Amino acid sequence: MIRRFCGLVLLGLILAPRPLQAAELPLPGDTELQALRALDLDGAFAAVATGIRFEAYPGILRGPRGAVLAHGGNAADQALLLADILRGRGYRVRFVRGQLDGGNLDTLIRGMYPPDFPNLKLAKDYLPYDPGADTALRALVADHVWLEVDQGDGTWLPLDPSFPRAKPGEAYATPMARPDDLPEDMHQRIRLTLHEETAGGETRELGRLEGRAAVLGLTPLSLAILGVPQLKAPEPEKKKGGGAGSLFGGAMSGGGQQLEPAAGPQEPAKTVGIMYRRMLQREDETVDLTPSLVLDEEAGSAIRREWLEIAIEAPGRDPHIVVRDLYVDDAPAVDGAAPAPYRRYSLAVMTGPVDDDAVRDYARRLGTQIDLDASKARIDAIGDSTDSKAASEVVAVDGEIGPLAGHLAGLAFAAESDALARRIGHNNGVAFAQATPRIVIVSVEGGSATSYRVALDLRLDEVEAWSYPGYATRAAEHFQSARGIQNTMLEGHFLERILGVRQTANTADLIAGVEGGQGAMLVFGLGQEGRLDRIEGLSPYARRLIEQSLGKGREVIIPPRPVQLAGRARLGWWEREPGTGRVVGVMDDGLHQAMTSYSVDTKEIGLNDETGFVIGAIVGATSTQFMIAGLMLEYGELTDQLIAKVEASLEGLKCLSCPKAEASASAGVSYGDSCFSVGVKIEAGVSVSAGSFCEQYVAGMTCASSMILQGLKGESGGPSVSVSAGVEAKAGC
């Protein structure tokens, strides 16, 4: 167990093999940004215009470093990057805010897309996407920002790097204001707030950290909590000094109030409670949060719930609130026990996509700042010891390098996710942009040297997607599905790799192991809270989570009983929001991943045709991922033969899942047919569009699995997944 924990703590050793020295810590994107700062005016303009693609999202999100790392940004972030470079070279610049309209607005929207589109096999009847008619997109892009540079003779030269084939001296929007700096209300902001509820019913805020997303993003953020036992001697004589000790190097026992023993034999001091000390770290800045004193003789002082609230504020939009429970007294595997004595939550906040090369460069530069070799030697010296001294040493080492290791883990996960998303997006005719910060939480929780729980929680990961002009409107929605399901599968495999374990607990793995298959799943909707008793082994905490979702009008799709996963019985479920179509995977401990987005109409609560399509899509995607992962061990790499084998296996799986659908489906139903025409009134027109739940289930499987395979192939043409008919289907099974 101790070495599994060290696998996460020493992730930096894998990425940064060189010894570390004390100096100012680097940040992701530093190398690329420094290179740009060496350019002259013409070189800087060309680098931003050609190297930072235009993306649509509200306000200032990334700033100069984030735009460089993402290789993209909206007009405001592109202008900020160019201003940063030019001001560093001594130029006087000012910003210009204005409105785009007409042909220039159309041109900038077209610049979101690549010059060449893939040649996809689309359905016979589908609704083509027209960016010119998308009023929300046009309003987002019309609010424009660019630069002007002082030429020294009283004139100002316009610089607008957002436009395709832009040139210095050209302006494309009507100017409305010319500020020296962009106003604060244009910035997206992040607020982290820690809350606590006691058994006595008291709720209080323990502290907060807030700032611009462009500033907090890409910097290591860490919340550490240490429970220090409070001791009492039989004849206390108070002595000055003491305290809880260091959060990052202190022991797992002792501390608290120190006492002067009386002369002669004494009874050992006894524990009367625990003091929970908390710290928020950002780079080299430490913020002490309010501590909690839990006394054994005061039942009301016990912690009932502890949670972190993450608020994202973007111009023109309602605040986006995300909550992560850190401890709940009736959550599974807790059963009334106190919070773990040691907990660390490393938050990787990314304001845009990252790539693997940038992550490795960042890790190499960290290799000159912190002595990970010394940390590795200390971990090796601990070995498999289980005493409190070993636990204290683990805490001390994690305090020194844990925040950076967790930050690197989050960045590495995001890099893999983004690489997959780029392939899936383009090969399926979809452009997308990360419009709000992505937040990955890597947590380490434990109370001894051999008992630690490590989790990677994709707490917030949303993109906005737009189909290519003329392509099926629903392609963007199904891209969200493919990307989300990829991330859930990736989350599990990523942790398995860095920790060296055989299986992790995530929603996709759990649902794949449901006894009786997907047909055994239960579906609940608004007003059906009373039916939750049908679920075996549902904990009070998990029930509250489901009731909260149902109260918001969501549907919940859940197995009827727990599934053995990663060594114990677990429950997990999908949540589906009929209004927006968003589907989220949730585990019974509250950890979840953003999964899929569908825009479908709900005719009724229960196993209706649309629900069949959604469940089929989830099963198709997860089955595809499992097959690919298994065959990679055989083939060693992603080959045409491997993909062909997956396609053949999926045909058999669909046949076994729903043989009746084979008889009613026409031969040769393709990815485009199943995704864009099946089950949608405005796009209906193929033979299985008005079918049963079972037929929709197969259609969803076809759509999701084909989209993922198409993305992995890297081809312009999509795979055609055939559906046999009649007796041939039975033979195929």
Image: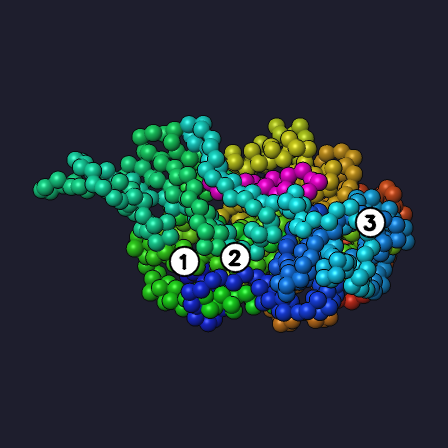
Q: Position of residue 405 (x, y in %)?
A: 48, 59
Q: Residue at x 67, y 56 (%)?
A: 80
Mark 1 Cα-neighbour bin, 10 Å: few <14, some 14–19, many ≥20: some
Magenta-colored span:
309-328
Report the side of 268 relative to 275 (left or right).
left
Disc 3 target residue: 174
Q: Is residue 327 magenta?
A: yes
The x, y position of residue 608, in whole percent, is 76, 38
Q: Is residue 599 above or below residue 168?
A: above
Q: Is residue 105 magenta?
A: no
Kind of residue at badge 1: Glu
Q: Could you say which disc has been placed on residue 400 in the image?
A: 1
Overall secondary structure of the magenta section: strand
Which class describes the residues within 10 Å of circle 2: few (<14), some (14-19), or many (20+)?
many
Q: Quadrant of residue 382?
A: bottom left
N-terminal of the two: label 2 or label 1? 1
